[in-house]
Amino acid sequence: MAGSDADAAVDVLVVGGGIIGLASAWRARRRGLSVTVLDPDPGRGANQVAAGMLAPVTELQYGEEPLLRLGLESNARYAEFAAELAEASGGMDLGYRRCGTLAVALDADDRAELREVHAFQRRLGLDAEWLTGRECRRLEPMLAPGVRGGLLARDDHQVDGRRLGAALTAACERSGVVIDRARAAELTYADGTDGTDGADGADAGGERQVVGARTGDGRLLRAGQTVLAAGSRSGELYDGLPVRPVKGQVLRLRMDGPFAGFLGRNVRAVVRGVHIYLVPRENGELVIGATTEERGWDTTVTAGGVYELLRDAHELVPGITELPLAETGAGLRPGSPDNAPMIGPTGVPGLVAATGHGRNGVLLTAVTGELVAELLATGRVPELAAPFSPTRFRRPESAEVRAS
Ligand code: GLY
């Protein structure tokens, strides 16, 4: 039986088969490592609700330049990643669309703020063009007549997060990754404990080592290296990682028949201080997202959430009220204290992290898979991953404890 206590260790156990875990597993397998992914429902994490914007330029926030660099790198790799993945999955279509993104301002204050953002983007050498309101509406005729201006990021694209998850699952299975469809109950340490009693994984007896994970049905899966990629659950499995769930509610409308081509590219704005975006897919789906809520593990779709999304989207594109509402949903982003992911060694021997991707999981999937696989195969932290060390949140006193 796969994964019984009698099983030999695999090279790599990936705990969590969301898109980050699967991409890491697939890439590691391609480097010749034996890999098992542990997840009851692989490919169906937060990506199931994600709009799938690949938007490093228009998601840019002040003070997040390292994250921007990682996002740009992942975006630059996406076309090749999507092509390789389509082939490795046996020809699945990922809905990767090089459509660009238009970020618009709805009033004079928004316009002034967006102008500042544009200046910041230009200082960083990013490709973003300022457009007047009329130019915005020429590109997207369904925009509200009051749109005051906007910026066009030609390289902010989109991919279908659901198709991405399905393709990564197929690519893993076809390339020889074992997918164990069980829930991870806990990480397992060489001393037989579950690791939830210390922020740095060390105990009074010295350094502990992660040797795999125990499944919900009581089996021990042993591995030379364990990758914690359990999305918003990651902090639950190892409390040295400050990952928390950040709820996002999302709507799916249909642009069929007379509404085909309703929008041609991703459209976004900040309405009443809240980000709203509309992502039109080639298959006729229009995704509207997303709320950002700190509500623990709650994934209820609320009347208030739906109302706010529709209200704000309607201000931006009034015609949306004509479209059929096909689906509502809510998911949990794996949030991190500085909005940047945790990629690399955790400081606990045998335990690597690939989590905390927050709003950028879909975008960062391409680069994260490669960085994790490189680390696993070579033992060296790739330069690009260095700013995202999972140990960056440690308090100095825990370093003293370790040193003593
Ligand atoms: N990537 C956008 C969001 O998480 O809402």
Image: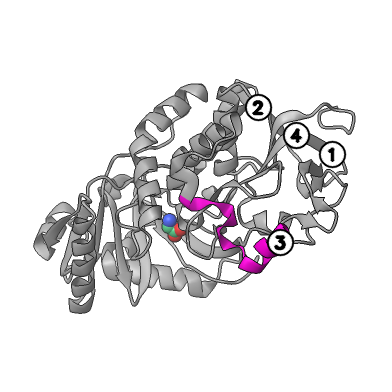
SS class, disc 2: loop
Disc on the earlier residue, 1 or 3: 3
Q: Residues within 10 Å of mark 3 (few under 14, many from 20)?
A: some
Q: Which residues are magenta?
A: 387-404
Badge 1, how many Cα within 10 Å: few under 14, some, many 20+?
A: many
Horizontal side of 15 relative to 160 (left or right) equals right
Give coordinates of residue 149: x percent, y percent. Answer: 15, 66
Count how many numbered circles sit on residues in the image.
4
Task: Write down which quadrant ligand 1 falls in.
Answer: bottom left
Which residue position is annotated with label 2?
177
Question: Which residue is label 3 attached to?
Answer: 199
The kind of secondary structure element at disc 3 is loop
| Residue drawn at 23 percent across, 58 percent down | 121
* Residue identifier under label 1: 220
Lateral position of residue 378 relative to residue 135, left or right: right
Judge depth for marks 3 and 2 and give the one in front.
3
Label number found at residue 223: 4
